[in-house]
Image (cartoon, helix red, strand yellow):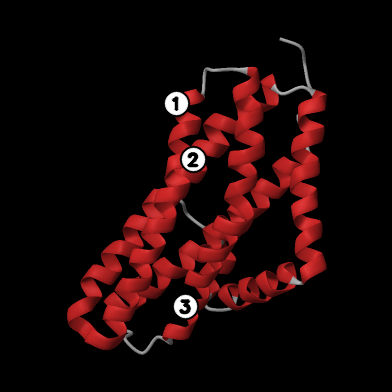
Amino acid sequence: MTHRNNHHISLDIIQKEHEHLSVAIQGMLYFVRSIKNGNDTQDLKIFRTMLYYITEYPERIHHPKEDQILFAKIKERTHQLDNELDALSEQHSNGELLVHRLHDALLRYEFGGAEAFQQFHTLVEQYAHFYYAHMRTEEECILPVAKLVLNDADWKVVDASFIKNQEMMDETGERYNYDQMFAQICSFTPLLNEGTDRKK
């Protein structure tokens, strides 16, 4: 197979977005685990910020470019990952449903108190496990194959799409808003500054 240039801006963008989403999810885990360990005075506004970030960023910014551009290009070049790519696209839709359930569980905890916490905690843990596994599949299974099978013309299309997405966010000010939210999430706990652990 012909050697290709494996460094592309779209891969850098995907990696950075995965890192940011990992931090937000780790913050959610820290939040519920802190409550479980007796700190029941956590500000729910912090969790809402995390939840809003993972609601808006993946669904409106991250996933569409993966499904419509990157995954589609891979399918044009090889069918070896068709099942995996279809599963990942389905997980994108399922992730939205899981986030809605998290919203509902948060409301039940807010108004129902301690009796509603266990379900809230369980759903956060399940979501973290689900999304970390999803990102690992993309990074360890999909992206290495993309580097092998996509040609330079394919990468020009993929890179241009991700770059355009970033430019549109700048034009509307959305990236500034997301950066502000991300800064709030990072400042929530020192744990987030030590990196994330996708196995937890």
Q: What residue would you read off at disc 3?
A: 48
Of circles 3 and 1, which is in front?
1
Q: What residue would you read off at disc 1?
A: 83
Between residues 146 and 154, which one lies in front from this camera angle? 154
Residue 67 location (% of width, % of height): 58, 40
- Disc 3 element: helix
Residue 187 location (% of width, % of height): 59, 78
Q: Is residue 31 left or right of residue 75?
A: left
Q: Residue furthest top?
A: 1
Q: Which mark is residue 166?
A: none
Q: Is residue 55 left or right of residue 179?
A: left
Q: What residue would you read off at disc 2?
A: 89
Quadrant including the C terminus: bottom left
Type of the residue with mark 1 = Asn
- What is the quadrant of residue 28 in the picture? bottom left
- What is the quadrant of residue 37 in the picture? bottom left
Q: Residue furthest left?
A: 115
Of circles 2 and 3, which is in front?
2
Residue 185 location (% of width, % of height): 56, 74
